[in-house]
Amino acid sequence: MATREAEIASCLPGELRTWPDGRDRPAGVDAVRLVYRHAGAPPQFDEATVLGAVQRAARAWAGCGIAAEVLGEAAATLPGAPPVLVQWNEAEARGNFALTDLGARRLSLNAAMFKLLAQRNPGHPAAQTLQMALSHEMGHFFGLMAHSRRCIDVMSYYDSGHGEVCSTRDGASPKAVVEYRALLPTACDIARCRAVNGRAR
């Protein structure tokens, strides 16, 4: 999968293409601060595993030029913009593995979906799905509202919902692997983030 690795690491001219499902906008903050609450997590994930995934996503998105911090719950009472609460809340995830509420500053994970995944496909690497879902939803807090047409991007959707499918650099089907999408933001995800937030290199 050398092409896939190259797609993760580089962003070629013309590859910053998105579905018409949103409009990127500046994050409007100097730092994205996150607090993780473990209550309600499914049994296959201990607190250290999920917290580690939140921290990896935050470190990767910091390449956008906006600081990202993962704080303890006590930090939620500090002055300034409230942190993003990363929580397990099935109702707020609305049938997705994860879902963002920008207005309420919440990123909700769905324990029921991960339990179902474990039942239906016990061999599936659920920790990778967790990482990808966290990285994707976190990207919205950095201003990426549209979804990428590049299959590899963590901010991608594989299809438009209207018969159009995402693209790969070599034209191959993303179905060649279980999950083509990257676990962390790619070079194109970061390039889009820097551009919309005025952090161009």
Image (cartoon, rainbow, N blue to C red):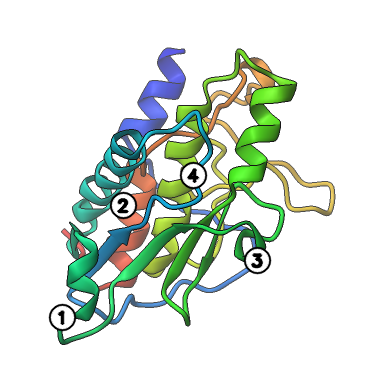
Q: Position of residue 99 (x, y in %)?
A: 56, 59
At mark 2, the secondary structure is helix
The reply to whether dot 1 and dot 2 touch (C-beta < 8 Å) is: no
Residue 190 got which mark?
A: 2
Is the residue 80 above or below the residue 144 in the image? below
| Residue designated by label 4 | 41
From mark 3 to mark 4, how far is it between C-alphas? 34 Å
Residue under the image location 53 percent in, 27 percent down: 126
- Asked whether, in this view, residue 37 is left or right of residue 97, the answer is left
At mark 1, the secondary structure is loop
The number of callouts visible is: 4
Residue under the image location 58 percent in, 26 percent down: 179
- Residue furthest to the right: 163
Instruction: Residue 134: tell me if it is visible.
Output: yes
- Which of the marked residues, 4 or 1, is nearer the chain's N terminus? 4
Query: Which amino acid lies under the numbered mark 2 shown in the image of this protein?
Result: Ile
Query: Which amino acid lies under the numbered mark 4 shown in the image of this protein?
Result: Ala
Quadrant (top left/top right/bottom left/bottom right) for the C terminus: bottom left
Is the residue 2 above or below the residue 32 in the image? above
From mark 3 to mark 1, how far is it between C-alphas? 37 Å
From mark 4 to mark 1, how far is it between C-alphas? 25 Å
